[in-house]
Amino acid sequence: MEPSVLQYLKLFLLLVLVGVTATRVPHQDLPVSLGTLSLDGHFSFHDLSAAARDFGNLSSFMPAAVLHPGSVDDIVKIVRHVFLMGERSMLTVAARGHGHSLRGQSQAARGIVIKMESLQSVRMQVHSGTSPYVDASGGELWINVLHETLKYGLAPKSWTDYLHLTIGGTLSNAGVSGQAFRHGPQISNVNELDIVTGRGDIITCSPEQNSDLFHAVLGGLGQFGIITRARIALDRAPKMDRHPEQLEIIVQPTGSLWASHFESDGIVLFCLEMAKNYNPEEAENMEQEVKNILTQLRYIPGSLFHTDVTYIEFLDRVHSSEVKLRAKGMWEVPHPWLNLLIPRSSIHKFAREVFGKILKDSSSGPILLYPVTKLRWDNRTSVVVPDEEVFYLVAFLSSALSSSGPHSIEGTLSLNKRILEYSDKASIRAKQYLPNYNSKQEWKAHYEARWETFQRRKNAYDPFAILAPGQRIFQKASLTLYS
Ligand SMILES: Cc1cc2nc3c(=O)[nH]c(=O)nc-3n(C[C@H](O)[C@H](O)[C@H](O)COP(=O)(O)OP(=O)(O)OC[C@H]3O[C@@H](n4cnc5c(N)ncnc54)[C@H](O)[C@@H]3O)c2cc1C
Ligand SMILES: *[C@@H]1O[C@H](CO)[C@@H](O)[C@H](O)[C@H]1NC(C)=O
Ligand SMILES: *[C@@H]1O[C@H](CO)[C@@H](O)[C@H](O)[C@H]1NC(C)=O
């Protein structure tokens, strides 16, 4: 199989679900001094419950207020004000993208949640030319970036599976999908950022300018600053300007076949999803290329099928599932997801035990696997990945649809725990993606040798630990909430 020909690979498996902890903290009014600041936008003190929710539906922390910023300057003013209140103030600040975190990471108990999507003052600007890019707000949804750039026949190079996520939110993690093996994660496809640090300074940074801050923020879990603008590298969207019917092929076995085989034989079946970008006039070549690839694969012949869809339909495919799940009331349910990065040397061992044994009889959602090459990851960023040339993102995307049993929150969380315990015991050397830990000890273990750097950067850019408290890495001196 030639990776150069595949736009991306996915192996679907079976899976499981998880647990909920809702913590309510009493509402507390903001210090009067904040009300004296003149803003382009406004604070809201009512309807705070939306800011105390996220996609995970497992954690809920009520903020004191939600800021709807009318400008970048609003964000600067508020963060600087909170910084100047000093270490002893209890206030923290969380940037909230689309709130698609899993464990309260974009929430701020009794703090200020900044609704980044309200930041309309940074208008998207597409620059075509030899190295095209788009400047966009940190609160912009990737789906909007796609629509805007396609007007110029351009598109970002690296994606997430789902586009109703914000630039700031995915860049704070990494942004991984089927294109990452070729182009690297989204954090490897950014040229420049504007950051409001935890001191309330606004700083433009890039690999050449203020590079330490630039790398800190990428994969930095919101710990070092708020991304207000990002310059995203673009590529030609395969002739989309000339051929609006840009097409894709997706090859995968049918769900029913897949399910019946899984149950009857008790063996683990992998579904390989393959996508090929092409333009209509290249259709014949594409067919030949796909045939060539298929001759190199072993698969159940009757399970093969393909669909032709437009480039947008392909990239936005998860949204169509969202619409269907919403209609059935199956979207706003607890999502005890677990995402792991597994080094290639232990992926077989991991698969045998986890797919073959631990999850043998459970299926509470899809499991996705993506191979990625380390080559495209920059080790100066904050994200940690396994120390091997090739590793896999293994995403256990569970929905807790029942209130008891293996598909309940508790059932899934306990399976997740077994997977993590097994990985530790068997020296799989896995790293969590979208990491979730509760103690500093665990965070240190996560960052290993990188912890010193992570801590140094925190002291430099957010010394009072004001930002993104929901990650539970650092705690403001005045708070004992999470300890
Ligand atoms: C259905 C679904 C599919 C997904 N698919 C993928 C996928 O394919 N690949 C992948 O990599 N991830 C995927 N994710 C995970 C996604 O990257 C995270 O949920 C991430 O948190 C982005 O969500 P968000 O934009 O809503 O950010 P939020 O959840 O709102 O924020 C995430 C963190 O970043 C901080 N933050 C938010 N905005 C900013 C900003 N402007 N500046 C600084 N910090 C900020 C927040 O404080 C918080 O700590 C998926 C999530 C869901 C729910
Ligand atoms: C989970 O979602 C339901 C429905 O939207 C909501 O009522 C509940 O408060 C949420 N729980 C948490 C912990 O966020
Ligand atoms: C990053 O990788 C380079 C090249 O392999 C290495 O020399 C350097 O020490 C690494 N830096 C960090 C911070 O790990």
Image (cartoon, grey):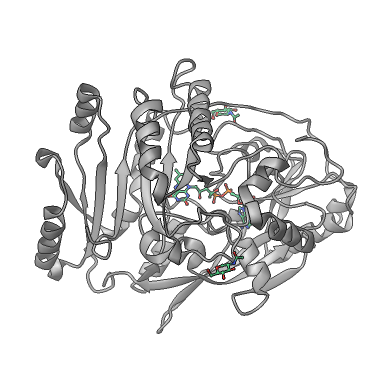
The extreme bottom residue here reads 130
Question: As drawn, is 361 to the left or to the right of 478?
Answer: left
Residue 441 falls in which quadrant of the image?
top right
Indicate the position of residue 439 as horizontal and vertical percent values: 70, 38
Residue 348 falls in which quadrant of the image?
top left
Q: Is residue 107 visible?
A: no
Residue at 41% of width from left, 84% of height from top?
129
Question: Can you tell me which quadrant of the image ligand 3 is in?
Answer: bottom right
Instruction: Name above or below for residue 468 compared with residue 450.
Output: above
Residue at 85% of width from left, 45% of height from top?
477
Indicate the position of residue 397 as horizontal and vertical percent values: 43, 37
Quadrant where the C terminus sits is top right
Question: As drawn, is 138 to the left or to the right of 130?
Answer: right
Question: As drawn, is 442 to the left or to the right of 321?
Answer: right
Indicate the position of residue 324 as horizontal and vertical percent values: 34, 36
The extreme top residue here reads 404
Indicate the position of residue 168 as horizontal and vertical percent values: 57, 58
- 157 or 410: nearer the eye? 410
Residue at 37% of width from left, 60% of height from top?
181
Quadrant where the N terminus sits is bottom left
